[in-house]
Image (tube, grey):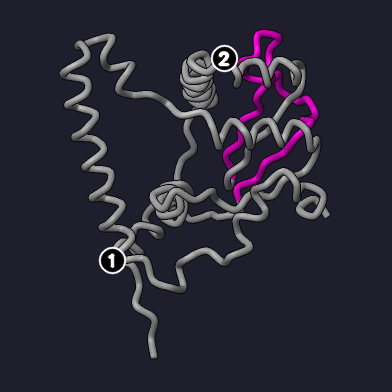
Amino acid sequence: MATPQSPFSFLDGLLDRVAAGPQPPQWLVHEVQQRLVLFINHVLMQEKEAMDRLVRQRGRVARVQWRSYSMALLVTPAGLFNLAPQGGVPDLQLAVTESSPLALAETALRGDKPAIRIEGDVQLAAEINWLVDHVRWDLEEDVARLIGDAPAHTLGQMVRRAAQALWQFVGSRVTPSAAPAPHAADGASPGNADRAAA
């Protein structure tokens, strides 16, 4: 009996063809990474405990890899991130093992972590795992600074309803074979860094 596929499975092939096409220039990649670091730091600055935890890891480098894309982040003395200098050896390497962008999106919509292979410093991995578990972007607060509290709250409710509807829509179309194996999340926990590195 054939297993039903997601109605969006054709997008995986399309995304693969786009990714295999001409690569963006290095200056554009650098600018996108710089903007991403600014956004991450903006979110971290709203959570003092996150910055305090990162201060203890200052000078360490974590490299995040997905498919052929990677970004190395240096922890600054202020407890924030900066792009690490080229060619350095990272203290921690985090490689997302799922190559399908749609599978990653489905995992995120379910509220799960993607499977990650972890190699390197266990303490730095534990701190980054804490950040992933506890730090959230408060979009509503940022929008309130621009348009006021009441409109921002209304906009926030609309976004939450839309996200919930999207989650239910995608969740109803995920096939049992597309669901992650029970051990998939184990690779994402820092306590399993030694096993994942082996």
Q: From the top left corner, tell me how far across and down residue 45 is, in percent.
A: 52, 13
Q: Which residue is mark 2?
A: 48
Label 2 is placed on what type of residue? Lys
Q: From the top left corner, tell me how far across and down residue 133 is, in percent.
A: 55, 37
* Earlier sequence position, callout 1 versus callout 2: 1
| Residue that appears at 30% across and 22% down | 140
Residue 164 or residue 25, whichever sits in front = 164
- The answer to whether 182 is drawn above or below residue 135 in the figure is below
Find numbered disc 1 in the image and state the secondary structure of the residue it sits on.
loop
Left or right for 5, reference 185:
left
Whether 136 is among the magenta residues is no
Label 1 is placed on what type of residue? Pro
Residue 20 or residue 142, whichever sits in front = 142
Sort mark 2 into few (<14), some (14-19) or many (20+) by Cα contacts within 10 Å.
few
Instruction: Answer with the quarter of the image where residue 4 lies.
Output: bottom left
Q: From the top left corner, tell me how far across and down residue 51 is, in percent.
A: 62, 16
Residue 174 or residue 32, whichever sits in front = 174
Tell me where the magenta segment starts and ends, as one range: 68-96
Find numbered disc 2 in the image and state the secondary structure of the residue it sits on.
helix
The reply to whether residue 46 is in sight is yes
| Residue that appears at 45% across and 53% down | 107
Left or right for 165, reference 117:
left
| Residue that appears at 69% across and 50% down | 117
Sort mark 1 into few (<14), some (14-19) or many (20+) by Cα contacts within 10 Å.
few
| Residue that appears at 63% across and 19% down | 83
Q: From the top left corner, tell me how far across and down residue 124 is, in percent.
A: 74, 31
Q: Which residue is mark 1?
A: 7
